[in-house]
Image: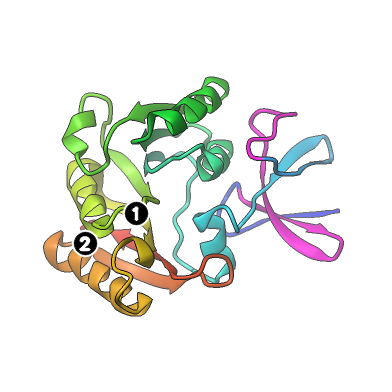
Amino acid sequence: MQVKETMIRGMYQLKIDQKNRLATQNKVPGTSVYGERLIKVDNEEYRLWDPFRSKFAAAYLSGMKLLPQLKGKNILYLGVSTGTTPSHFSDILDDGFIYGVEFSPKVMRKFYRLAEERSNMIPILADARRPEEYSSYVFDVDLIYQDVSQPEQATIFGRNAQEYLKPGGVGVIAIKSQSIDVSLEPEEVFSNQMKVLEDDFGLQVLESSTIDAFEKKHAVMIIKKA
């Protein structure tokens, strides 16, 4: 079996049955997080990374070129849910760590159990719309990743970027058009959200792409703070 590291350090491509599959080296060998397949190659265990359940993996396979490096970064993750994508980030980080913000107590209980096995995850039960609520727990970060289903997605990102993202820091935001305005075409929603990020918060949108092959009516944007 062929294993090749991608342009994202710590993200690998495994050739299985003539198909390329994304994967990370498992930080907790023998443990699957969301039912993903575990594969051993040369005494190293890999977890397959499902792009239909992870916007970051979907963005990579959709050809986005400016996705940020994760290794060694401190990340504020807004909308960690039960930890599908965060668990792969955890595999990659090495010395970095993840502040995982989630609003739902029921969902957070599942993420908390995951964090008990992974020392680089810090669960925070809070509302991402109110970043001041977790200022006692979060310090400046290198990267903000956001995947929430709120109408004001760009505003949530912008407020958190103002509060926690280091100058020159980068963000990744998954925009869900149907959570914002079902009466508009997705492209118009994406354009409006981009304007909020740039005009209201002074952020720079470096790259934007839909991920229709994996998730309809969604876009991923790469953001930079001056």
Please say if 118 is above or below 47: above
How far from the left and from the top, in percent, is residue 139? 26, 31
How far from the left and from the top, in percent, is residue 10? 60, 46
Would you name the residue on which mark 2 appears?
203
Q: Residue at x 23, y 45 (%)?
A: 160
Of labels 2 and 1, earlier in sequence is 1
Please say if 54 is above or below 94: below
Query: Where on the picture, by quarter, is residue 223?
Result: bottom left
How many residues crowd around disc 1 within 10 Å: few (fewer than 14), some, or many (20 or more)? many
Left/right of residue 49 with respect to residue 77 in the rendered view: right
Amino acid type, mark 1: Gly
Q: Is residue 20 located in the magenta-colored stretch of the structure?
A: yes
State the CA–CA distance, disc 2 to disc 1.
Answer: 10 Å
| Quadrant of the frame with the C terminus | bottom left
Hey, which residue is sitting farthest left in the picture?
A: 200
SS for dot 2: loop
The boundaries of the magenta stretch are 11-34
Amino acid type, mark 2: Leu
2 and 1 marks in contact (CB < 8 Å): yes
Left/right of residue 47 with respect to residue 185 in the rendered view: right
Q: Residue at x 58, y 71 (%)?
A: 213
